[in-house]
Image (cartoon, rainbow, N blue to C red):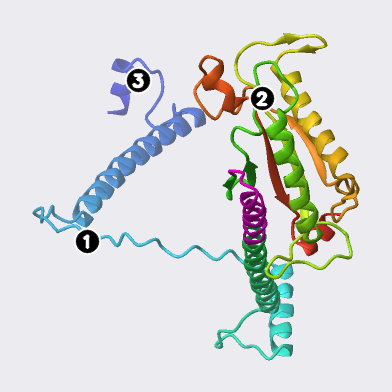
Amino acid sequence: MSGSWERGGGFGMRSGEGFSAPLLMAGWAVGLMSLGLALLVVYSFLMRLNHESLTPPSLPRVEVPAPRIDTAPSPPLIPQRDAEVERLLQENILLRRQLGLNGEEKKEMPGEGTESAAAKVENGLLEKENRQLSGRFQEINRKLLALRTSRAQLLSRIQGLLGENGFEVQVDEKEGRLRLPKVFEFPLGAIELEDQGNNALERLGDALLKLLPICAETDAPCPKGVSTALEGIYVEGHADGVPVRISPLQGNWAISSTRAAHVLQTLFASRPALKEMRNQRGETLFRVVGFADRQPLVEEAPDAKSRPNRRVEFRFVMAPPVEEATQER
């Protein structure tokens, strides 16, 4: 058989003699690679089989009711305390121990106690001040009522004295005005009283001299029941709505003021002592003011009916309580 290899095989070598070392090594390498590939396929198959065996079978779906959620806010998370926070907490604990406080007792902190005490003191002062102001207010009202009463008594006395001489006198206690109808009125455009008016003015001067010691700084005694001083006596001039052009007077403002001034000058001329009267501040007691046609007594009409608007009146103003006047000054 060995001869047949040489003849028919064409290799020109015997079996076992013609294989070189490289070819042998290549064959072994191919064999090893085939074996590794086979092992890898087997390993993959085993791993897949192992995974399927570990996977649990699918379970039927069970409806579980949703749990009830509490809507109350969760407590805030406490951050991790660092060294500085720990130090402050320790100081706070030490301070509370020194002040006799502990975490279980509910007491006021020092700042709160101080504010509470200060508030109590302030409230006490405010209540005391309110009581004082209330008492002062009541006292002022009492004195103002006494002033109005005194002025009403004064006007009533003047009215009585003039009434004894046959003069009609009208008194406005609320405004403190004294008016003599007809006799203290003026003809159209006139600035001087007529004879009856001058006579009534003299009687008024006598009554004032008798009663004004209650109102001025004099040594004369005060009548019983009247003890309050006057601030001033205003002679008020008035006019009607008829335009007046009398040189040097131009308009009802001028004529009303001139009427009041002329009446006061006539009063001083007949009773000079009245000119020296002073109020509590040392000011002249008598003053003059004009109102033109701004305060009519009757509806405007021809001369005869409008005469009450052309008049002079005397208004008595009482001085404020002595304590209040002193405080304002």
Mark 2 surroundings: few (<14), some (14-19) or many (≥20) residues within 10 A: many
Answer with mark 2 or mark 1, whichever residue precedes in sequence. Answer: 1
- Circle 3: element type: helix
Q: Position of residue 59 (x, y in %)?
A: 11, 55
Q: Within the magenta stretch, is there residue 123?
A: no
Nearer to me, 55 or 97? 97
Residue range (magenta): 149-168
Q: Position of residue 2 (x, y in %)?
A: 32, 28
Q: Quadrant of the N terminus?
A: top left
- Circle 1: element type: loop
Q: Amino acid at mark 2?
A: Phe
- Real-space Cα separation, disc 3 to disc 2, in angstroms: 183 Å
Q: Amino acid at mark 1?
A: Pro
Return the residue at label 1.
Answer: 67
- Real-space Cα separation, disc 3 to disc 1, in angstroms: 93 Å
Q: Residue at x 55, y 87 (%)?
A: 104
Nearer to me, 124 or 84? 124
Q: Residue at x 49, y 23 (%)?
A: 299
Label 2 vs label 1, nearer the camera? 2
Q: Residue at x 54, y 19 (%)?
A: 304
Residue 328 in the figure: left or right of residue 8: right
- Real-space Cα separation, disc 2 to disc 1, in angstroms: 105 Å
Magenta: main secondary structure equals helix
Return the residue at label 3.
Answer: 6
Q: Which quarter of the figure has residue 130?
A: bottom right
- Circle 2: element type: loop
Return the residue at label 2.
Answer: 186
